[in-house]
Amino acid sequence: MHPKNISIQDYTYNLPDDKIAGHPLTERDSSKLLVYKKGAIVTDTYKNIASHLPQNSLLVFNNTKVINARVVFTKDTGSVIEIFLLEPYKADYTKTLTATKTCNWKCFIGGAGKWKSGSLQLMVNGNKLLATVIEKLPDAYVVEFIWGGNTSFAELIEHAGNIPLPPYIKRKPEGEDKERYQTIYAKFDGSVAAPTAGLHFTDAVFKTLTEKNIQTQFVTLHVGAGTFKPVKATVMEQHEMHAERIDVDITAVKNLIANLGNTVVAVGTTSLRTLESLYWLGVKAIVNKNAEQLEVKQWDVYDELQQTNFTASEALTGLVNWMQEKKLTSLFTQTQIIIAPGYHFKIAKAIVTNFHQPQSTLLLLVAAAVGDEWKTIYNYALENDFRFLSYGDGSLLFLNAE
């Protein structure tokens, strides 16, 4: 079956509210770990994840950093309006976050009906921050921010904004969230949702990986609010997959090539989307050597690219060659790839991931990795008191094809 014809109703399960983790555990690496391999399931904790990985494996992590994307303004009337920063509007993250006078963002607006016209004002550490709607988009707004002084926009929202907890965590952000809704290796500002599979990793866990000669590699995918976008369409062809920005250094691509003979493990769905996108970007670079820009659209890998038959090494080498020809030391582009049952994995051999919402594209990704066994895995997790979603426990899933 072509993934376009998948009915999301076939990818549901009963998730009781009391199974959704509302807070993180005291110790990151004490979270439970479900390990699935060749039909067998065992339970452990993240402290021992290295013992379940083959020696010389390569773990790929997403080092994006969550920004304080929820900014609350109060009008003179007392009305509260929340602006949720989604992504820079027609600009790159670095330029926008380091801007010192003005920048534009694509945003959701809570209480938009109370904001008829004019600018909202907020004082942030002595800086007057003004927000003005300059355009209405089909699914969001474009908001222009203007402020004085030499403070960067990243610094402003660090003080003015709140951590954007997922909608299913039905509480306001608390002190612990500033640290715990962030991986310990978060480096590059840009996400409005955490790459949650990485929340379980600690310095102690990284030490055990090193002791087993397991390598680590970092890539960047800025996670958008679209990761929580519900699938409302009857079939997946009618669902528009969210696009996300990736930023990958050429040395990371070369390291992937060097490790294709080992077990490549994606830590999180975002890392997995990045890895598989790199393969298809490489295919595009080979097919169209003169391309000025490379990106992956939602159905590319099932339609026109389906007929190509390059190995992972050939595709990634093609990508490196294209980057070198363009004199690029890093690749900054976007991917809209949808990984669903019917997808054939090119690089990843396993994935570390949390437990996802029913009828979500993330659950489709898990089903692509392990087939119908996803039902057995999720039933096991429910019956054995695993905690679900962002602050919950997680799993190490080896692809069924491996």
Image: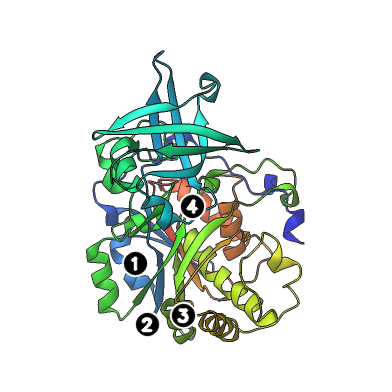
Q: CA distance from mark 2 to mark 4?
A: 29 Å
In what element is the residue under mark 4? helix
Disc 4 and disc 1 in contact, CB within 8 angstroms: no
Res. 371 image quadrant: bottom right
Viewer-nearest of discs 3 and 1: 3
Question: Residue type at mark 1?
Answer: Ile
> Disc 4 marks which residue?
380
Viewer-nearest of discs 3 and 2: 3
> Disc 2 marks which residue?
56
Disc 1 and disc 2 in contact, CB within 8 angstroms: no
- Residue 41 shows in the view: no
Q: CA distance from mark 3 to mark 2?
A: 13 Å
Give percent across and percent down for residue 116.
Answer: 54, 21
Q: CA distance from mark 4 to mark 3?
A: 33 Å
Mark 3 or 1 closer to N-term? 1
Res. 341 image quadrant: bottom right
Question: Residue type at mark 2?
Answer: Asn
* Quadrant (top left, top right, bottom left, bottom right) of the C terminus: bottom right
Viewer-nearest of discs 1 and 2: 2
Q: Residue at x 69, y 48 (%)?
A: 239
Q: Residue at x 32, y 39 (%)?
A: 148
> Disc 3 marks which residue?
256
Q: Tell me: 145 left or right of 238.
A: left
